Image (tube, rainbow, N blue to C red):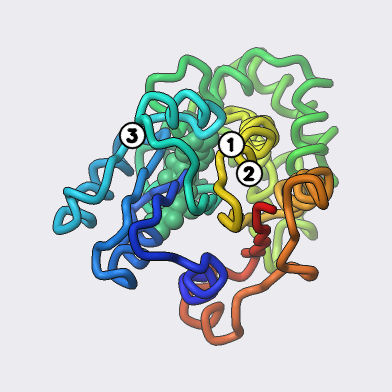
Amino acid sequence: MLKEVLWWFNIRERGVYLDCTVGAGGHSRAILDEMRGKVRIIGIDRDEEALKIASQELKEYKEQTTLIKANFRDLPQVIKEENVGLVNGIIYDLGLSSMQLDSQTRGFSFRWSAPLDMRMDSSQALTAAHLVGELSQKELEDIFFELGEERWARRIAEFIVEERRQNPIKTTSNLLEVMRRAVPAKFRRGRRTHFATRVFQALRIRVNEELENLRVSLSYSFDLLQKEGRVCVISYHSLEDRIVKQKFNEAKEEKLNILTKKVIRPSKKEVRINPRARSARLRVAERI
Ligand SMILES: C[S@@+](CC[C@H](N)C(=O)[O-])C[C@H]1O[C@@H](n2cnc3c(N)ncnc32)[C@H](O)[C@@H]1O
């Protein structure tokens, strides 16, 4: 949703912009290109690999860019350490990058056999294998149901606990195999969404505490904006979007003017070119 972001973000020359999810640097690069480098970008990511890619992508704007390995829930510290004062805009493009999703070793995808890792920040201790190996059946069921809206949550949790009594579930293919047994055949075939998608999503959200991070970060971020500074949030599922909507509404009138009365969805053309964009939802608000 690059075009939409550029339009809504209302970028100004010499402004300071905080890209909380710099990823491969796509949004930051577009902002820098648009202003021919006459802005400053502070780009944050939890993922060391992403920052390496971003620094390549943004190398011609080295002077104008500061890349920082951090969790966006620690935004106030990052801003303080960078000594920037209030910023002109903040963007969040949530979820996983294509680099993470397509990695054959990091365990985010069931398309390859890999350790059940799923950490965005590889220095973190907790992995998906810990959750699958150690949580109780009820805790697993709740994660699959609440974070994945998985209708077979109870059965899958039951099969996992049964399986791990004999064999540890350490890889994406171990987990996929258990799920194949737990989910009835007629619910596995011919579906638009692969039968493992929701459980993988749920585990990933829990490993990375994605919802809590977003909630905490949005509680601070409006106070880091200058007057008329804008916050843009692109989310990819309803749990995230609900938090964004709620946080915007809580700050409405006192701190924010909500600019997107209805959520913005990607164009049909964009979804055709990039099917992963199909679930994207953009919300934008302006600091009063
Ligand atoms: C969808 S990608 C961003 C893609 C980016 N906008 C681009 O144009 O290349 C999301 C990125 O956010 C990062 N991320 C997710 N949660 C984060 C958090 N709490 N703190 C910092 N980075 C986070 C992920 O590691 C990932 O690289």
> Residue 105 or 18: which is nearer the viewer?
18
CA neighbours of label 1 inside 10 A, class few (<14), some (14 to 19), many (20+): many
- Which label's residue is closer to the chain start, 3 or 1? 3
Element at badge 2? helix
Location of mark 2 (residue): 201
The residue depicted at 60 percent of the width and 58 percent of the height is 228
Could one spot residue 175 in this view of the protein? yes
Location of mark 1 (residue): 204
- Determine the CA span between mark 1 and mark 2: 5 Å
Q: Quadrant of residue 123?
A: top left
Of labels 3 and 1, the one closer to you: 3
**Marks 2 and 3 in Cβ contact (< 8 Å):** no
Element at badge 1? helix
CA neighbours of label 3 inside 10 A, class few (<14), some (14 to 19), many (20+): some
> Residue 65 or 156: which is nearer the viewer?
65
- Determine the CA span between mark 2 and mark 3: 26 Å
Location of mark 3 (residue): 68
Could one spot residue 149 in this view of the protein? no
Whether residue 102 is situated above or below residue 218 in the rendered picture: below
**Marks 1 and 2 in Cβ contact (< 8 Å):** yes
> Residue 256 or 116: which is nearer the viewer?
256
The residue depicted at 38 percent of the width and 26 percent of the height is 122
The residue depicted at 79 percent of the width and 60 percent of the height is 186
Whether residue 133 is situated above or below residue 54 in the rendered picture: above
Q: Quadrant of residue 235?
A: bottom right
The residue depicted at 74 percent of the width and 58 percent of the height is 257
Q: Quadrant of residue 280?
A: bottom right
- Residue 251, labelled with which disc? none
